[in-house]
Image (cartoon, rainbow, N blue to C red):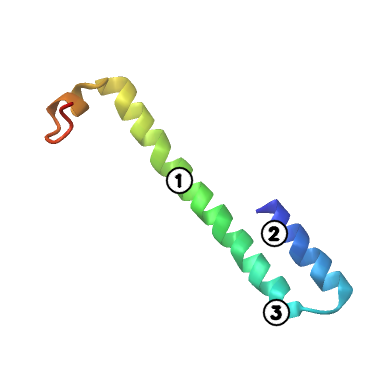
Amino acid sequence: MVWLAAISANLVTTGKYFDVAVRDLVLAVGAYTLASLTEAMVEPAALAQRIHGNAEQAHSPGLEA
């Protein structure tokens, strides 16, 4: 995300390619949003696994080896 924002800032300072700068800035916002959503989804799943152990996997159909 920071890398894309830095590229966008560099493009704006050159005074050219404003469309590419905006595109990179939007991609940076999207990357931040996806990272935040991933973190929000992974933490509860990890907590549930710590609480319930692997019991959920043992009862899930289709996971037999």
Q: Which mark is residue 4?
A: 2
Task: Give the vertical position of 46 relative to 38 (above or below).
Answer: above
Question: Which numbered circle lies on residue 46?
Answer: none
Q: Residue furthest right?
A: 14
Picture residue at 80% right of the left edge, 70% below the top: 11
Query: Residue 26 versus residue 63: which sits nearer the camera?
Result: 63
What x and y, as percent, mark residue 36? Answer: 51, 48
Left-right relation of 26 to 37: right
Three-letter amino acid code of the residue under disc 3: Asp
In screen coordinates, is 45 left or right of 23? left
Judged by depth in the image, the label closer to the viewer, 1 or 3, is 3
Q: CA distance from mark 1 to mark 2?
A: 19 Å
Write the residue at 57% across / 56% down: 31
Label 3 sits on a secondary structure element that is helix
Q: Quadrant of residue 44?
A: top left
Residue kind at label 2, given as amino acid type: Leu
Q: Position of residue 63 (x, y in %)?
A: 18, 32
Q: Is residue 48 above or below residue 10?
A: above
Q: Earlier in the sequence, mark 1 or mark 3?
A: 3
Q: Quadrant of residue 5?
A: bottom right
Q: Determine the secondary structure under disc 2.
A: helix
Name the residue at the front extreme: 65
- Please state the horizontal and vertical placement of residue 56, each as a whole percent of the image: 20, 27
Q: Amino acid at mark 1?
A: Thr
From the image, tell me which residue sits under label 3: 19
Query: Could you give the CA–CA distance between mark 1 and mark 3, rounded to whole angstroms?
Result: 29 Å
**Mark 1 lies on residue:** 38
Q: 10 Å neighbourhood of mark 1: few (<14), some, or many (≥20)?
A: few
